Each structure stands twice: as C-alpha cells, then as structure tokens.
Image (cartoon, rainbow, N blue to C red):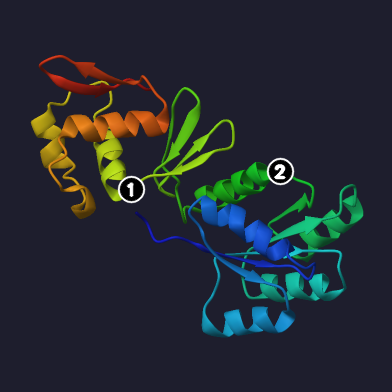
Amino acid sequence: MAQRPLVAVFDLIPGAARQCAAHLDLRGYETSALAQPWELDSLLARQRPDLVIVGAGASGTDLTTVRRLAAVGIPVFVMLAEGDTSAAVLMLELGAADALTRTAEPRELVARVDRFFARTGRFHRRVLRFETALADLTAARILHDDGRIVPLSAGDLALLGVLAEHKGKVLSQEDIAFAAPAAERDADGHAVVARVSRLRQKLETGLIESRRGAGYVLRIK
C-alpha cells in the first residue's frame, strides 16, 4: 500500500474537526484534527501536510489560514456555510483548491479529496464494486450500501487482491495459497476454502464463484 497522505482538518467549531477527520480516517487517510491555531502551527513546524481542510466562518482566522497555507504551496479545502457563494469565490481567489458547504455529505467530502489526490498523482485508491458493497483495498475496509463498515484483515486483503488481479480467471487452491498466504494470525490450519467463505460473508457476495475441482474465480468488471 502506498504511503497515506496526511490530511489536517482545522476548525474552531468544537468537535467539527474531529468529526471530519474521522470520515477521512475511515477511508484510509492519515488525519490530524486541529481545533486551535497553535495546534496548526505545531503541526506545520513538525511536518508538511498534503492537504489542509479549513472550516471557515467561525472567525477571521480562516482567511489568514488559507492565505498563509496557499502562499507556501500547501493545498487547502474550505468548508463554508451553505449558500455563502461570495465567501467561496473569495477563498478560491485566495488560493484554496476547493470549497464546499459544511452540510455536504461525508461521501462528497471524501470523493472530492480522492479526486484531488488522484488528479495530482499523489494517491490512488484501489476499490472493487460488488453487488451491495464497495471493497476499499487502500483503507482495508468494506463499505456496505446500508452504511455498515467491515474491516478487512491482512489475509482478506491478500486473498481479494489476488482474485482481483486475476479476475475472470479460475485460480486453484494451490495458486491462491502460494500467491496469498494466510496472515500469521490466520495460520491455524484454515484451508483456502474457509478463507474464501469468510471473505464472501464479509462482502455478502456471490461474485466469488466456485469451480468444482478447479478453484475460484472473481466475476467483476
């Protein structure tokens, strides 16, 4: 897995930074939630974040922060009150990379961050779409359409990665065992068939098909 980008979230509204950072953390980003100007100063003194999300509107601090970060080439996203188009234009003029409303769905925020890093070539998320779930191999999680989040173990990731790499091709149990050996914590006699069964249950999918006497094949586009 590629090194995770560091996304800092700076917001003076109590709890807002932590809530925003939590959504990004679930999608595989390294995050830092900052609620005070001195916390942002401390972070910048230690390391350079790949992106800073600024919650605007609490005070004039946001204007200074956006201008300051843009001046040193640190990308900035700004979260604004809904309908405040003049503020959005101002922030973009000051150098913000993007602006969205505070009421935006967490999925929209994550999608914008994903798109930003993909466009800059910094970070590419590896995802697989199943019937009712999205397997995020970058974040090692399954996101079900009903909102449930199921973690993927190291063994699950190795197994799913091999099946995805050879999608449409039947792999024998021996092929899978060689290419995706069980993680140490799973190495207690469980056969490939048990690992595949567990992965199917987590994904709630029928797209990992059995071929009697031959092995398994992943049927996704």
Q: Residues within 10 Å of mark 1 (few under 14, many from 20)?
A: some
Q: Residue 153: which disc?
A: 1
Find numbered disc 2 in the image and state the secondary structure of the residue it sits on: loop
At x 52%, y 78%, the residue is 47
Three-letter amino acid code at disc 2?
Glu
Quadrant including the N terminus:
bottom left
Three-letter amino acid code at disc 1?
Ser
Quadrant including the C terminus:
top left
Q: Residue 87: which disc?
A: none
Asked if residue 129 lies left or right of residue 49, the reply is: left
How far apart are the alpha carbons under marks 1 and 2?
28 Å
Number of numbered labels in the structure image: 2
Query: Residue 8, percent across and down?
Result: 61, 67
- Residue closer to the observer: 96 or 213: 213
Q: Residues within 10 Å of mark 2 (few under 14, many from 20)?
A: few
Earlier residue among tags 1 and 2: 2
Asked if residue 100 lies left or right of residue 116, the reply is: right
- Residue closer to the observer: 157 or 85: 157
At x 22%, y 18%, the residue is 210
Q: Residue 105: which disc?
A: 2
Query: Residue 74, percent across and down?
Result: 61, 69
- Residue closer to the observer: 41 or 139: 139
Query: Residue 25, percent across and down?
Result: 54, 57
At x 60%, y 51%, the residue is 113
Query: Residue 54, percent across and down?
Result: 73, 65
